[in-house]
Image (tube, grey):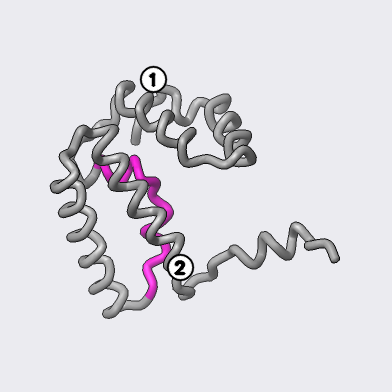
Amino acid sequence: MSIDPAEAERAHQVRLGDELPQEFRKRYWNQVKQTLQRVFQTKESLANELVGKTREKLKRLEEEKGPQTFFYHAGPLEIASDLTGRKPIGPPQKALYQELLEEWSSPEQLNDLEKVRREGHLDVSHPED
């Protein structure tokens, strides 16, 4: 029995008000922590503290207002930059982040990453908003 690709894709979709899978959250925050350490040269203890405090704030907000899935639309680079107060994100940070993206990516995702590169969104000279 083969799996319908469209059905598999729907199985991974999150709808408004749904909880995000715990595994996704764990991976996301680990990537934020790695970005803090490698891209913004944050010591591990401080990276753990920043991530921990942010997760606690988000948890309290979710307890009060329900799932905050929109938060996870921001990528680890943007969150790490916000946590360190280092804006704008410059060419050296983007180059280091590209290295992390390659480490985190599966072979299929590397194709998507190459498309993002071609479009220039992670180009070291691409301006940040």
Residue 34 vertical position relative to residue 17 in the rendered view, above or below: above
Task: Name which residue lies at 39% across and 20% down.
Answer: 125
Identify the mark nearer the N-term, 2 or 1. 2
Q: Amino acid at mark 1?
A: Ser
Q: Is residue 73 magenta?
A: yes
The majority secondary structure of the magenta stretch comes to: helix
Q: Position of residue 69 (x, y in %)?
A: 42, 65
Task: Name which residue lies at 31% across and 40% down.
Answer: 35
Task: Name which residue lies at 78% across and 62% down.
Answer: 3
Q: Is residue 76 magenta?
A: yes
Q: Position of residue 74 (x, y in %)?
A: 38, 50
Which quadrant is home to the N terminus? Answer: bottom right
Q: Position of residue 77 (x, y in %)?
A: 34, 40
Stretch of the chain drawn in magenta: 67-81
Q: CA distance from mark 2 to mark 1?
A: 33 Å
Q: Amino acid at mark 2?
A: Leu
Q: Which numbered marker is on residue 125?
A: 1
Toward the viewer: 82 or 43?
A: 43
| Residue 76 located left or right of residue 122 | left
Which quadrant is home to the C terminus? Answer: top left
Task: Label 2, secondary structure: give it.
Answer: loop
Task: Label 1, secondary structure: give it.
Answer: loop
Task: Name which residue lies at 27% across and 79% down.
Answer: 64
Q: Are marks 2 and 1 in contact (CB under 8 Å)?
A: no
Query: Residue reaching furthest right?
Result: 1
Identify the residue position indicated by label 2 in the image: 20
Q: Position of residue 99 (x, y in %)?
A: 42, 29
Residue 100 lies in what quarter of the image?
top left
Q: Which numbered marker is on residue 42?
A: none
